[in-house]
Image: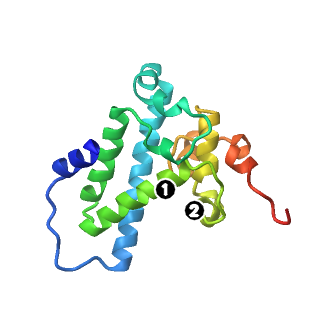
Amino acid sequence: KKATVGQWLWRPPIPLPKEAPSLSEFLLGILGCTILFDFQYYLWHLLHHKIGWLYRTFHAIHHQYNEPFSLVTQYLSAWELITVGFWTTVDPVLLQCHCLTAWGFMLFNIWISTDDHCGYDFPWSLHNLVPFGLWGGSVKHDAHHQKPNTNFAPFFSHWDWLGGTTSSFVHSYALKGRKKKGD
């Protein structure tokens, strides 16, 4: 509750234009914000796992659960909540997005973060819909909670591929619980 009020008070004033963004502007704005946020969080997450003091002081609380469920997405230290909230708020401003796009990005970010921590491998989850394994999803993030020095990117998979921090999904409880076709 306090974080929401703080974010509302801190957010730079952005006027509400008379025109809504076009659908393509809306979707491309959310995609741009997601890519930027994903890169920022990948670096932040990597540093907080590689530097022991940062991990112990700020990020370890999130890893008290090695089998995540949806509420774990918000089980954070104040520093982590402020940092993530800062990027979520500032990235749409940096990319000069319409305020409706900024709000859409915030909702999308919460939805995807919750899905990543849900512990389930739903057929309709984005990692099952986005081709070529470009989206990590709950299976990859679940594996991160099993093997904490891997899979740092919150959404896309390419940062972990490029950084050599990707891990196989076999460590995921979500994947182990998924029924195969024909079962």
- Horizontal and vertical percent for residue 9? 16, 49
Residue found 64% across the figure and 62% down from its top = 128
Q: Amino acid at mark 2?
A: Leu
Residue 134 percent location from the top left of the image: 59, 57
Question: Which amino acid, mark 1?
Answer: Ile
Residue plotted at (52% across, 47% down): 159
Sequence order check, earlier mark of 2 and 1 = 1
Residue 15 image offset from top left, x and y in percent: 14, 66
Q: Nearer the viewer, residue 59 or 163?
A: 59
Q: Are marks 2 and 1 in contact (CB under 8 Å)?
A: yes
Q: From the viewer's perspective, is residue 122 above or below residue 170? A: below
Q: Specify the farthest residue to the front.
A: 1
The disc at residue 126 is: 2
Residue 150 placed where, x, y %?
Answer: 60, 36
45 lies left or right of 163: left
Give me the residue at 58% from left, 53% from top.
Answer: 137
